[in-house]
Amino acid sequence: MSSQDQKVAVVTGASQGLGAGIADAYRKLGYAVVATSRTIAPSHDAGILTVQGDIADPATAERVIAAGIERFGRIDTLVNNAGVFVAKPFTDYTADDYATVIGINLTGFFRLTQLAVEHMLNQGGGHIVNITTSLVDNADSNVPSVLASLTKGGLQSATKSLAIEYATRNIRVNAVSPGTIKTPMHPAESHEVLASLHPVGRMGEQSDIADAVIYLENAPFVTGEILHVDGGMSAGH
């Protein structure tokens, strides 16, 4: 159990990569963490509750929020980090590709955020951070990404809509829009090419995204913000 005044963050896609880094950053901030993914392992840290499940299944959202409330008594922040990226020419996408990307990137966000907001309203406030992609703002002919733009672009628009809807009820909603970050998703042999996509000439680090999320956490006058952490991608080439 956490102390009654210890804040609690829920982080999706938390078994590796950006999600693991974000969960670790919240623990360093003193938060308890509810960490979820399909493959996440139990934690030896009493301040981390892990919940396995497919975020595309609304039942997973129900279990994550219920488990967090039962263990820690509150939910202060939700970080919608879970996501999948499928890069294909538009006409090569299959029905399975579409269902997979929609399920993880949008359906998972939708139900989990509904449940979190309901609890935050009863609690008196909270914070939501959505992880999107700078390809939404800066399409690249070298990286065909219609499904990413369709889903993460929707998430980006929803960020602003939710921020305005709940602005007077002490719930802030922001997004971090990364460029290409060094994670297990990208093998080392691809790093040189991926670095060249960024005006600064390098890929980002996982800590860059975690630091951005924590900045937003500690910025009470910031809501509806899309914070680009992308080595200049969204500014142009």
Image (tube, rainbow, N blue to C red):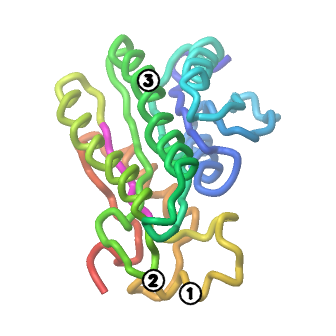
Q: Residue at x 51, y 71 (%)?
A: 180
**Residue at label 1?**
193
Q: Which residues are magenta?
A: 173-178
Q: Residue at x 41, y 77 (%)?
A: 231
Cα–Cα gap, marks 1 and 2? 7 Å
Q: Look at label 3 and name its amino acid.
A: Ala
Q: Is residue 176 magenta?
A: yes
- Where the N terminus falls, by quadrant? top right
Q: Position of residue 158 (x, y in %)?
A: 28, 41
Q: Is label 1 or label 3 in front? A: 1
Secondary structure category for the residue under label 1 = helix
**Residue at label 2?**
197
Cα–Cα gap, marks 1 and 3? 39 Å
Image position of 150 (left or right of 162): right
**Residue at label 3?**
116
Mark yes or no: residue 50 visible: no
Q: Look at label 2 and name its amino acid.
A: Leu
Q: Position of residue 32 (x, y in %)?
A: 60, 30
